[in-house]
């Protein structure tokens, strides 16, 4: 996913470990490991991302 603007999670610790970055891809959300951005990223449909975030927020 070249040319995409990635945003680091707001839950990143001070040392930046265990973090993901996300990108708005119009109808999908891109997800990648911030420690290894050159590795493959994945993307999920917006409704799936919203459901995941809602579920995590409920815990």
Image (spheres, rainbow, N blue to C red):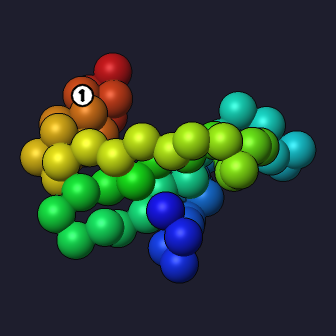
Q: Quadrant of residue 10?
A: bottom right
- Residue 3, x across and y down, in percent: 53, 78
Q: Which residue is mark 1?
A: 55
Q: Is residue 54 visible?
A: no
- Seen at 11% across and 46% down, the residue is 47
Q: Is residue 8 above or below residue 19?
A: below
Query: Going by the image, does 6 lie left or right of 31?
Result: right
Farthest residue in the left direction?
Answer: 47
Quarter of the rendering occupied by the C terminus: top left
Q: Nearer the viewer, residue 41 or 16?
A: 41
Q: Is residue 9 left or right of residue 42?
A: right
Residue 33 drawn above or below residue 26: above
Residue located at (32% from left, 55% from top): 29
User: Residue 39's quadrant in the figure?
Assistant: top right
Crowd band around label 1 with a 10 angstrom C-alpha radius: few (<14), some (14–19), many (20+): few
Residue 30 in the image: x percent, y percent? 40, 54
Residue 48 place in picture, x, y as percent = 17, 39
Dot 1 falls on a residue whose secondary structure is: helix
Furthest-right residue in this view: 15
Q: Is residue 55 above or below residue 2?
A: above
Foreground: 38 or 26? Answer: 38
Q: Going by the image, does 22 lie left or right of 47?
A: right
Q: Is residue 26 above or below residue 38?
A: below
Snapshot quadrant of residue 40: top right
Residue 45 appearing in the image? yes
């Amino acid at each position: 996913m070249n040319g995409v603007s990635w945003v680091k999670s707001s839950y990143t610790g001070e040392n930046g470990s265990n973090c993901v970055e996300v990108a708005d891809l119009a109808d999908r959300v891109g997800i990648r490991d911030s420690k290894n951005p050159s590795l493959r990223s994945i993307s999920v449909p917006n409704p799936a991302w919203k459901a995941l975030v809602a579920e995590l927020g409920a815990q």
